[in-house]
Image (cartoon, coloured by chain):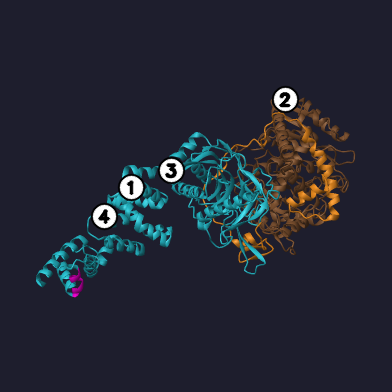
Amino acid sequence: MSICKKTIKETAELLRSKKIGTVELTDEYLNEIRKKNPTINSYVTICNEEAVKAAKASQKILDSGEAVSLLCGIPMGLKDNICTKDIKTTCASNMLKSYIPPYSATVYERLQQEGAVLLGKLNMDEFAMGSSSECTIFGPVRNPWNSEYVAGGSSGGSAASVAANLATFSLGSDTGGSIRQPASFCGIVGLKPTYGRVSRYGLVAFASSLDQIGPMTKDVTDCAIVMNVISGYDNKDSTSVNTSYEDFIEDIDSGIGRLRIGLPLELFNSAMDDDIKGAVISTLRRLESQGAILQDVSLPSILNSVPAYYLISSSEASSNLARYDGIRYGYRNEKAETVSELYRMSRAEGFGGEVKRRVLAGTYALSSGYHDELYNKALKVRTLISNEFSLVYENIDIIAAPVYPTAAFKIGEKVIDPLKMLVSEIFTVGANLAGLPAISVPCGLSKDGLPIGIQLIGKPFSEKLMIRVGYAIEQEMGRLEIGE
Amino acid sequence: MDKKTVRKMADVANIHIDDNELESYVEDMDLIMGYMEQLKNLHTGEAELKEANSLPSNGFREDFPHISPDRDELIKNASVTQDGCFKVPVVVEP
Amino acid sequence: MEYDIVIGLEIHSELKTSSKLLCGCRNEFGGEPNTRCCPVCLGMPGTLPVLNKQALEFAIKAGLAMNCKISEFSKFDRKNYFYPDMPKAYQVTQYDLPICYDGFVDIEVNGETKSIGIERIHLEEDAGKLMHDPDGQSSLIDYNRCGVPLVEIVTKPDLRSPEEAKILVETIKTILEYTGVSDCKMQEGSLRADVNLSVRPKGQKTLGKRTEMKNLNSLRAIQRAAQAEALRQIEVIDKGGAVCQETRRWDENKGESIVMRSKEEAMDYRYFPEPDLLAVEVDDKWVKSIKYSIPELPKSRRNRYISELGIPKYDAQLITMNKKLADIFDRATEVCGNPKLASNWIMTDIMRRMNENGEEILDSFFNGDNFGQALLYLEKGEITHAGTIKVIDGIFETGEGPEGIIDRLGLKIQRDENPIIETCSEVLEANEQALNDYINGKEKAFTFLVGKVMAVLKGRGDPTQVREILLKEIKRASNKNA
């Protein structure tokens, strides 16, 4: 078996037993990337030299024999909206095509400290707006299971790189499902942490009150390993929460006992493909046979979650993206003769269509005539959704649901219908609106042989339980691996 | 959403839209916002206007100055600079 | 027709923190362009703000000093608009839940006390600075000031004349200086005001249409702009027109204002809660601890000067308007033991120096200690009035102590009679005409002769003693002549 197929845990053991060195390992990956990336298109920047340099440094740490992190020497990729000092961070946008950040995101600093090796930056929907990784200046990411299909989005490159064994793990960001949906489409594990669990410092903002960075890994154990490193308070992010340290690996295999799992009626009654529903239900039945108690629950306001999500995220985005004016960084229209022209033309030429639509929608929702009936109304729906989750959690431990109504769709199939793509996000946006942790774990294949994920949504800061349940599912259903 | 509204929003957001692309923006925006505007008629009762992320209050920094990074590092991404300043076409006060 | 003028002010004052509001860059005036900046205050992608606790406490302190209530719960909002001096294209400010609200400030107008309502005080960040490239084609941006903490103080429309507006700004400036939250250096733009003004026929209850005059950065500009705007509005109405609700810009050189934007062009700031900052909760205990840290404010200090030290009301008012001056007065009084002497010298000599050379002279070597010592020498009769001025000159010039200056310049009063008698007779011999004039009844001639003697004694003579001896000498001379 190729070394690149191995999980973090397996690779770390090989590194420790000196069966392979970090530089050799990094080279293996870089070779794989050279071979497969032209098809998959997951990497938009490949850090050949920097990766080898980092690998050498990690080897020294390993050789020192001191107690070292499991991530030491592990090759990884970062979504291209996570700032990396001296390495281009483009957000897959013409606006930031040649932007080189002067600082690193907190998550990257933490991974570097552990000795993880950055292979490169990963393709995505422009500014994380989208769910197919087709809205990118670098061309669409292709699904490693079938290159005619999308990898999902917006963290499509992060998902595809892990599924195609071009990185041991990656980080993505999730504003309305952008980690979970591509993880589901590519057959890997993707976790969106509780809002405030992971520092957002250095994550190029889409919608500040919804964005979270999270791990995308080959299995649930790896997810726990990465969470152990990236979680925790950061004094550079006021919204990161100071909770006591938790070891997410500890007790990962202690089972689920008489876990009470809530199944939201509104989501299970939503339109979805039969094979999706089938895979999710049969997974839940297997958990039931292990002792779990399945219980129908109701989250009535989830039916309004998509408009609330769209209006809030677009409103925040219209403000967050206003800074791209061509003056201090980013694309600049050199012909502009007035400041107004500089703004208007730089932004017209720097942003793609989907970004512009959302900025316009957000500007509209916040403008004085509509502020109350759109933006404020959306905030109220958000409160209702949050309250409904709290109420439901009084009687259950965790919620289970599909991630997406379909498996991966064909490239080009939905770009023409932006609304359809938005409406499908009903399964994922609730967790973002309520700030809850949620994970996608592979649970089967569609009739076309494409991966399907099941989603677990937990109480605030219940990632540990969620990971334990995810692990139980993985034990029951097995990992999904692409055949040769 | 009609042409006039899309134009106005584009003006506020400082995004130039060519006349020939306007139609397609209007079409998309009308479709999307038509769906999103279902919230307008929704009865939300006494729901509070708060951000749903139940974060604690009071996240502060002590008033200790840091050493600012090297200026060259901060302005290296700008297309046009002069004497350590960012440069723009002359700004006429509004 | 007669009109009432109605004025409300929005006063912006930079806070004297060590670092900026939302990042750790130094909060200092000037410096090489863009050297007090970092990725956060430049709004670079992915950066996040963290609130400076001191800035919040300064805002609360300012609010308490202006008798405001402090919000138990407040938050920050984004005010969205594009301008090259704002790197994020939004300003972090407070919209509907300001940190302080519902206060008042007392002002003294023509000897009467008037209470002016404070609507709210909120905390926000300052913008950068635009400079015009000499080529006339471009502007250059320096973000050093960007992110400096500001309080915006919004008054109720309680002011009834441009003079009251000026006095209020002066009074608030003093309060901010006393509380130590701001330097209020208007020439550096650290204190600026917007003037909201309307007029209405005398007796009418409802307010007229108001205009807003932006960014006035001197007391003179505030008063002049308000004066001119009141006259402009009255003229418009007298001619049968109507005042338009609009924002105007004052041109200090031309002494007139022009329209910046009409009501229709008013900006839609699309405020919404700043998602990157947490809400602020302030409990009683915290408010109390800030309250205890507020020093004596100008009003109570003024009352103390009047009732305890017997200083004239006008003098007390003027001295307390400047915190540094009042501090110098307090210390000098302690040292010399004579408050009236100290206030007289401040009102004449020191005020003259401040008028001639600016308030900054108070930041030099001159302080309450050396000033008080100089006055003590005067009080003890060891130096003359003229000598005291020379001592103060010396302090301002070199910072040398009074004792040294007195020694070096030989300013100690000459008490020994013999040299004075000698000098007097010499002067009388040399000025026979003046002597005769005096003997013939010309009183002025005596003053002339005293001046001559004092000049020869180089200010060391005690005027009273000199007069006595000179009189004796004149008598003797006239006897001799007769």
**Whole-number angstrom distance, CA of label 4 to CA of label 2:** 90 Å
Per the image, label 2 sits on a secondary structure element best described as: loop
The magenta span reads C430-437
| Residue at which label 1 appears | C311
Labels 3 and 2 in the same subunit:
no
Q: Nearer the viewer, mark 1 or mark 3?
A: 3
Q: Is residue C433 magenta?
A: yes
Position in image of residue C144 (x %, y %): 57, 57
- Under circle 4, the secondary element is helix
Looking at the rendered structure, the secondary structure element under dot 3 is: strand
Q: Residues within 10 Å of mark 2 (few under 14, many from 20)?
A: some
Gap between marks 1 and 3 measured at Cα: 18 Å
- The residue labelled by disc 2 is A258
Task: Compare residues C451 and C477 and report the one nearer the observer.
Answer: C477
Q: Is residue A237 magenta?
A: no
Q: Give chain A's shade.
A: brown
Given this view, does label 3 or label 2 mark the residue nearer the observer? 3
Reading the image, the residue beneath label 3 is: C112
First reached walking from the N terminus: tag 3 or tag 4: 3
Give the drawing colour for chain C. cyan
Q: Nearer the viewer, residue A282 or B79?
A: B79
Q: Position of residue C417 (x, y in %)?
A: 14, 64
Return the mark for residue A449: none
The secondary structure making up most of the magenta span is helix
Q: In the structure shown, which secondary structural element does the residue marked by tag 1 occupy?
A: loop
Please, what is the three-letter code of the amino acid marked with disc 1?
Ile
Dividing the picture into quarters, in which one does residue C257 lie? bottom right
Amino acid type at image mark 2: Arg
Instruction: Look at the image and give the colour of chain B.
Output: orange
Q: Which mark is residue C376?
A: 4
Total tally of numbered discs in the picture:
4
Give a yes or no on whether discs 4 and 2 share a subunit: no
